[in-house]
């Protein structure tokens, strides 16, 4: 049995490039024992991933990742999510409606820049209705060469097609995850700030709203900061998680990097048991 896990990955059901089956197959090739599919605002690929996990003898944890509108790049991961939760489905449906409204406004702005994309094609994409789907169409229609050009020229704050999009609040995300029996975890803390004191200040604020864990292992975390986060979790009754934030081969983060020991998964199961949670 492998000694490593990856609890932060994405598929075509958000902004990844692999199907859930392909992702789990690749995890098998990398020798992973446990994988979590954590698509942005979507549980659409989880059942396929779980079925593939059974085929390749990999434990698949149903997960999700929410962007939030808190200052800074705060994302909240949810683990052991109930795929059949009616309240989560209603919440995600309302989120998709807001995304579609935002996409239409953005496409209208692009049209003023003589970039004419097929609105129906983008909003009817069942997997991802977001900035990634717009950029993909811009590249396909040769308006830009790559995502970097699109982002810097059109979508960064203050640029030609920028429209503010209000994501979920961090408290809202944490509460919806806990309400359906999941475990809310702060994703990639180093993306929030370069200042460790500021990061821990935000973590303490999130703990007051119900945060239960931190993604201590992540490609952007230094070994020293990883150790500091693990120590903080131990001193504050938080669970430790970790993952690569893998999206596919078009981004630098490869699956199973960093190496997250299987003990993290074993401790996570004990943490969940202590909470008396079972889906």
Image: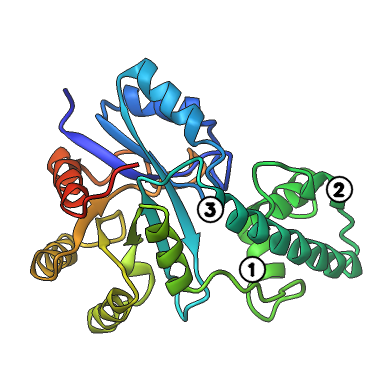
Select label 2 or label 3 by which is in front.
3
Mark 3: secondary structure: helix
Residue 51 visible in the picture:
yes
Residue 35's quadrant in the figure?
Answer: top left
Q: Measuring 17% from the left and 52% from the top, which residue is drawn there?
A: 271
Q: Position of residue 242 (x, y in %)?
A: 26, 51
Residue marked by disc 1:
152
Percent position (x, y) of residue 130? 67, 56
77 left or right of 149 in image: left
Binning the other alpha carbons within 10 Å of mark 2 as few (below 14), some (14 to 19) or many (20 upward) gives few
Picture layout, residue 56 above or below residue 37: above
Residue 26 position (above or below residue 181): above
- Ranked by sequence position, the earlier of labels 1 and 3 is 3
- Please name the residue shown 76% across and 61% down the image: 103
Which residue is identified by label 3? 88
Secondary element at tag 2: helix
213 vs 260, nearest the viewer: 213
Between 175 and 266, the one nearer to me in the picture: 175
Look at the image and tell me in which quarter the N terminus lies.
top left
Residue 137, horizontal then vertical, whole percent: 76, 48
Task: Determine whether label 2 and label 1 are within 8 Å by CB.
Answer: no
Q: Any mark on residue 120, and which?
A: 2
Q: Quadrant of the C terminus?
A: top left
The residue at the point 53 percent across, 33 percent down is 18
Could you classify mark 1 by the number of other residues whose Cα lies within 10 Å: few (under 14), some (14-19), or many (20 or more)? few
Disc 1 is placed on an element classified as helix
């Amino acid at each position: 049995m492998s000694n490593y896990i990856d609890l932060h990955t994405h598929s075509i059901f958000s902004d990844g490039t692999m199907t859930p089956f392909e992702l789990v197959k690749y995890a098998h090739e990398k020798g992973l024992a446990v994988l979590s599919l954590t698509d942005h605002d979507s549980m659409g690929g989880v059942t396929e991933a779980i079925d593939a996990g059974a085929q390749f003898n990999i434990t698949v944890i149903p997960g999700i990742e929410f962007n939030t509108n808190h200052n800074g790049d705060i994302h909240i991961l949810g683990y052991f999510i109930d795929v059949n939760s009616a309240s989560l489905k209603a919440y995600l449906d309302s989120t998709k409606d807001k995304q579609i409204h935002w996409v239409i406004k953005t496409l209208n702005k692009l049209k003023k820049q003589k970039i004419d994309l097929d609105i129906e094609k983008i909003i009817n994409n069942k997997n991802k209705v977001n900035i990634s789907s717009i950029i993909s169409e811009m590249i396909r229609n040769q308006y830009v060469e790559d995502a970097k050009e699109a982002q810097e020229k059109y979508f960064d704050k203050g640029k030609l097609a920028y429209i503010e999009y209000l994501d979920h609040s961090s408290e809202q995300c944490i509460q919806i995850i806990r309400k359906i029996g999941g475990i809310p975890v702060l994703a990639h803390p180093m993306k929030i700030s370069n200042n460790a004191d500021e990061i821990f200040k935000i973590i303490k604020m999130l703990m007051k709203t119900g945060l239960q864990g931190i993604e201590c292992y992540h490609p952007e975390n230094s070994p020293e900061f990883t150790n500091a986060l693990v120590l903080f979790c131990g001193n504050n009754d938080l669970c430790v998680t970790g993952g690569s934030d893998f999206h596919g081969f078009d981004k630098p983060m490869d699956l199973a990097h960093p190496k997250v020991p299987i003990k993290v998964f074993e401790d996570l199961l004990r943490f969940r048991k202590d909470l008396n949670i079972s889906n």
